[in-house]
Image: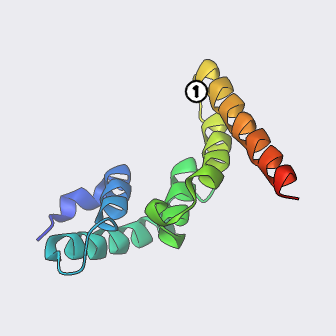
């Protein structure tokens, strides 16, 4: 039921793939979306430049969808990816690193209290 023209939009497929994992059993349209997106993302992964950021996102998503990952640990990975993107906003990157480091320090302090 999905048009193959959408298969060319890898970023759109990634969004569809991630959204399809938020459905419940019996939601046929989301199950079809997951099948469609998975198939075309796997095909795209074969032809994408293996070093590209988009190829890394595809491989990462196919390994385990974002909704099933620990978001704090994912933040570090996205900071690294964003840093390599051409034209990234350095102020935003500094804030993301500062936030990550602050939360990391908080977690470390909580672990010390428990010991």
Q: Residue at x 75, y 41 (%)?
A: 106
Q: Position of residue 1 (x, y in %)?
A: 11, 71
- Classify residue 31 as left or right of residue 38: left
> Quick check: 7 left or right of 113?
left
Q: Between 10 and 63, which is closer to the camera in this rendering?
A: 63
Colour mode? rainbow
What residue occupies the far top of the structure in this picture? 91
Residue nearest the observer in this picture, 31 or 11: 31
Circle 1 sits on which residue? 88
> Residue placed farthest to the bottom in the image?
26
Residue 101, given in percent of the width and then of the height, sits at 75, 36
Work out whether residue 104 or residue 19 is closer to the camera in this orientation and state it. Answer: 104
Image quarter where the C terminus lies is bottom right
- At 38% from the left and 57% from the top, the residue drawn is 14
Instruction: Please rate how many residues cluster around mark 1, counting C-alpha atoms within 10 Å: few if below 14, some from 14 to 19, many from 20.
Output: few
> What's the residue at 70%, 33% (across, down)?
97
Residue lying farthest to the left in this orientation: 1
Answer with left or right where residue 84 lies relative to residue 43.
right
The image position of residue 75, as x and y in percent, is 61, 46
All told, the count of numbered labels is 1
Tag 1 secondary structure: loop
Residue at (20, 58) in percent of width and height: 5
Q: Is residue 46 left or right of residue 98?
A: left
Q: Give percent across and percent down for residue 83.
A: 66, 35
């Amino acid at each position: 039921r999905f048009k193959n023209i959408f298969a060319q939009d890898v970023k759109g497929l990634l969004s569809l793939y991630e959204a399809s994992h938020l459905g419940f059993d019996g939601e046929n349209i989301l199950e079809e979306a997951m099948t469609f997106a998975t198939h075309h993302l796997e095909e795209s992964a074969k032809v994408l430049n293996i070093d590209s950021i988009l190829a890394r996102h595809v491989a990462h998503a196919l390994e385990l969808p974002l909704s099933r990952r620990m978001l704090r640990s994912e933040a570090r990975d996205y900071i690294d990816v964003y840093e390599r993107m051409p034209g990234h906003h350095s102020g935003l990157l500094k804030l993301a690193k500062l936030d990550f480091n602050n939360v990391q320090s908080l977690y470390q302090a909580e672990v010390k209290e428990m010991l």
